[in-house]
Amino acid sequence: MAAKLKIKNLTKIFGPSPAEALKRLRAGESKATIFEATGNTVGVNSASFDVEQGQIFVVMGLSGSGKSTLVRMLNGLIKPTGGSIHIDGEDIAACSPATLRRVRREKVAMVFQHFALFPHMSVIDNAAYGLKIKGVAPDERRERAQAALDQVGLSAHAESKPSDLSGGMQQRVGLARGLATDPEVLLMDEPFGALDPLIRRDVQDELLRLQKTLKKTIIFITHDLNEALLLGDRIAIMKDGEVVQIGTAQDIVSQPANDYVAAFVADIDRGRVFTAETVAVEPAVLQLDGDTAGDAVRTMEEQNRGAVYVLDGEQIAGVVTYQQAAAADRESGTSDVPIAEVMITDYPSADPGTQLVDLYGHASTGLPIAVTDADNKLVGVVEPEAVFAQLSGDPAQDEAPPAPLADDAAQPAAAR
């Protein structure tokens, strides 16, 4: 998929002689050395990343890390000292003021931490403000603002004043104002940072719900790692103006780039970061019609499995353990015991997005967990030991992640 935004070597230096400081920075001098020698402060140092269409890209860092400076450059509020910001191939870091205004009007909207609502205006007028600035006719902007309020669950409060609303509701008004202009890119600068924890989680969930439908390209700034891990399709971690790691939540927790990132993720609940899909492997499968206990034993020995799933066509019929299949073979004296006679029909299952914390009980059964798609077809299995290894942060598990699930994972070996 083509990148919606391409950020390359984006740099911002504050102070009396940014050109001199930039030269020193490119020569390899540190932020502290440059400040001591020139009085200039490096706000952002050569940040580079791509953001795909429809992706939530989270920029996470502590105060002073450069994340807010970064997002303000993306909106043209701060002019970069160096580097480029391409939105749909257009470099807004080097464009004319007229082009920048057009991009802001047509493509980009911003949601701030402190709501920035006008206290004398009604909720719907606040939501419509961006449309008013764009010159949209009153009737149309009211209609579009009302639709945005509907999206965030505030349609009943359209005529209220912001002071009549809770903090979480006020932030939803700010979100509605951003959505009303139908931007292609939504910049969110610590939008939930001023909210109480319980309200904050509600608004986070609301954003994820909206994103499933709207599929906006979102740059989300936060200092909260848990928020970053919850919301981000990809996450960039910043320190002292530099991007020190970019990856998925699973990448960052399992393979921190340095000690700084490792310290951040040390106390993260891995069970809420990793999912069934991240630890699943291709299943060993047999068919209910035709396969036997002997086939099950041979398959498990060849693939070093303790259990094998049985399919009736494309649907799961049950699961057979090595112990059961081998015992049936021994007792019968033949290898042609129908697999249905040794099959367990009560088996654990989960969808690919199930968090590991919710798989712990299933893993305790000792049976591999069937990972099924929306059509209830088997797309992978999670071995109990993989769940426990990932929850414990076993380094061996992190260094050798399971292979991605194949599209044909549910087909018997003989059919592939």
Image (cartoon, rainbow, N blue to C red):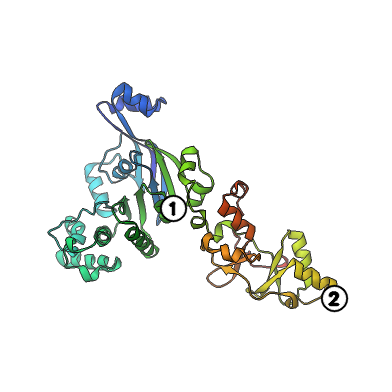
Q: What whole-number distance in Å separates the C-alpha atoms at marks 1 and 2?
A: 53 Å
161 up-or-down from 248: above or below: below
Asked if one can make out residue 28 in the rendered structure from this viewpoint, the answer is: yes
Residue 383 visible in rendering: no
- Residue 61 point in image, percent of width and height: 38, 43
- The quarter holding residue 326 reads bottom right
Q: Position of residue 198 (x, y in %)?
A: 34, 60
Side of 333 relative to 343 (left or right) = right
Residue at screen point 37% across, 36% down: 241
User: Residue 229 shows which numbered tag?
Assistant: 1
The one nearer the camera, 318 or 295, is: 318
- Say which of 162 and 175 sits in front: 162
Mark 2, secondary structure of its residue:
helix
Residue under pointer 2: 332
Q: Quadrant of the C terminus?
A: bottom right
**Res. 342 image quadrant:** bottom right
